Amino acid sequence: MSDNHSLLDSIMSVFVPVHSDGHKFVGIGVVASVIAFFLLPSVLFWIFFILTIYVAYFFRDPDRIVPQREGLIIAPADGLVSAVEDVVPPPELGFGDQKMTRISIFLNVFNVHINRTPVAGEIVRIKYIKGLFLNADLDKASQDNERNSMVIETRGGQEIGVVQIAGFIARRIVSFVKEGDRLGAGQRFGLIRFGSRTDVYFPLGSSVLVVEGQIMIGGETVLADLKADESRREARRI
């Protein structure tokens, strides 16, 4: 491989496609910037221009390298692991009142906001719940906030819950799928606009491979292993 080709690949890797859901927002920003350039003070042009660049950045949709093994639970979103705990899942998932392990991933306004399926399987339930727009990092957001809940049944018959939760800034949850769809692990299934949280629910006793405070890469980081027998990990900040 030539040095020039390697340099070109490095430069091109910076440019990530913008998801189609963001095209209209980028278009609005471009029009506003053009109008501001010709008709308004220059400071307004720069404000609109920077906002347009940010919107394109927010709706970026990079490809991911997804681990492919039955039993693995893959991170459904980029962001920070805000909680790893055993809780009773929200009723709309249909899991009853028995506790399950929940991993919560908080997405700030600079994270990739495309959500990806944590496991391969069939979507057996989808339920949209209207609610509040509290800070998505709060524990009660899982019960009080507007959210979209989905249950995926794996080939082995296990049901995994995924909940998209709107946050203080987020005002729109977008779903790309419907009940009955069969999806591969790491496949795109939706997004949340401008800050949010994504929770994953899975059976107690599964090997959890992440800890609070870790940064996740949606579609790549392995959260847990349903087939392994490993105690929960510990970590420290250094």
Image (cartoon, rainbow, N blue to C red):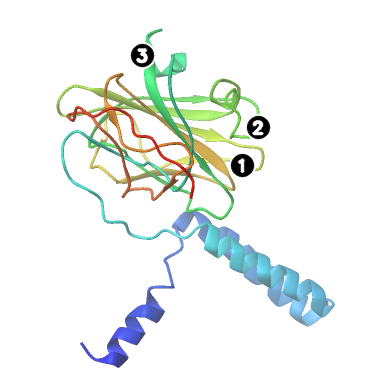
Residue 234 is tagged as: none
Q: Earlier in the sequence, mark 2 or mark 3?
A: 3
Mark 1 or 3, nearer chain start? 3
Do residues under tags 2 and 3 come within 8 Å of each other at their CB atoms?
Answer: no
Which residue: 35% across, 85% down?
8
Question: In this figure, which residue is indicated by the disc labeled 2?
Answer: 133
| Dot 3: element | loop
The image shows residue 48 at horizontal and vertical percentages of: 71, 68
- Residue 63 in picture, x, y percent from top left: 33, 59
Left or right, 70 with respect to 10, comes to left
User: CA–CA distance between discs 1 and 3?
Assistant: 27 Å
Q: CA distance from mark 2 to mark 3?
A: 24 Å
Which amino acid type is marked by label 1?
A: Ala
Q: Residue at x 22, y 22 (%)?
A: 158
Q: For residue 91, what is the image quadrant? A: top left
Q: Are marks 1 and 2 in contact (CB under 8 Å)?
A: yes
Residue at figure coordinates x 55%, y 40% from the top left: 196
Q: Quadrant of the N terminus?
A: bottom left
Q: Position of residue 154 (x, y in %)?
A: 21, 29
Q: Residues within 10 Å of mark 2 (few under 14, many from 20)?
A: some
Residue located beneath label 3 in the image: 95
In this view, the residue in front, 48 or 9, is 9
Look at label 3 and name its amino acid: Phe
**Residue carrying label 1:** 170
Label 1 Cα neighbours within 10 Å, binned few <14 / some 14-19 / many ≥20: many
| Horizontal side, residue 172 vs residue 169: left or right | left
